[in-house]
């Protein structure tokens, strides 16, 4: 019985290491991450439309291996505060839905034109 269990365990370990050889760690210094992909990913520059309609620069990293498709998207939110200020400056006075604030009281919480709220909700919005 013990021999069967050992042979089964060795077979599983061998099968796992054989398939793991196709995977390699990919590092993106520019986007600040490391990830295991089954090969070198293709990188495509795109525009990501956020929850509140901001167009943000992004990169999609993809690898196709047979019928399998692996993908990771990285969105750069660093310019959203400035975009919010520009959007807010174009709003008619008192347009709360565009400004993201009431009389300036919630500006630090919500951000200009909901830019801070957009960042806070990004992880929930992205899967949808």
Image (cartoon, rainbow, N blue to C red):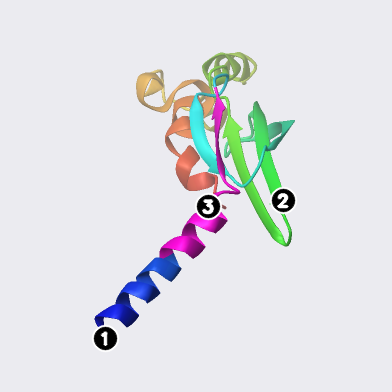
Asked whether, in this view, residue 97 is left or right of residue 44, the answer is left
Q: Who comes first in sequence, dot 1 or dot 2?
A: 1
Q: Which residue is mark 2?
A: 64
Q: Which residue is mark 1?
A: 1
Crowd class of label 1 (few under 14; some 14 to 19; many from 20; radius 10 Å): few
* Quarter that holds the N terminus: bottom left
Mark pair 3, 1: CA separation: 29 Å
Q: Are marks 3 and 2 in contact (CB under 8 Å)?
A: no
Say which of 28 and 116 sits in front: 28
Say which of 59 and 24 sits in front: 24
Query: Going by the picture, which residue comes out furthest to the front?
Result: 3
Bounds of the magenta segment? 13-28
Q: Which mark is residue 20?
A: 3
Residue 22 magenta-highlighted: yes
- On the image, the x and y values in percent for residue 73 come to 61, 38
Mark pair 1, 2: CA separation: 41 Å
């Amino acid at each position: 019985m013990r021999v069967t269990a050992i042979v089964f365990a060795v077979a599983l370990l061998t099968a796992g290491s054989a398939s793991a050889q196709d995977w390699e760690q990919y590092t993106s210094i520019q986007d600040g991450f490391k990830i295991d992909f089954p090969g070198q990913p293709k990188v495509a520059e795109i525009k990501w439309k956020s929850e509140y309609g901001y167009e943000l620069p992004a990169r999609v990293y993809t690898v196709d291996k047979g019928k399998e498709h692996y993908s990771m998207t990285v969105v750069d939110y660093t310019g959203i505060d400035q975009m919010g200020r520009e959007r807010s400056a174009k709003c008619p006075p008192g347009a709360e839905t565009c400004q993201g604030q009431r009389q300036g009281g919630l500006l630090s919480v919500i951000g200009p034109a909901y830019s801070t709220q957009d960042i806070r909700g990004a992880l929930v919005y992205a899967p949808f």
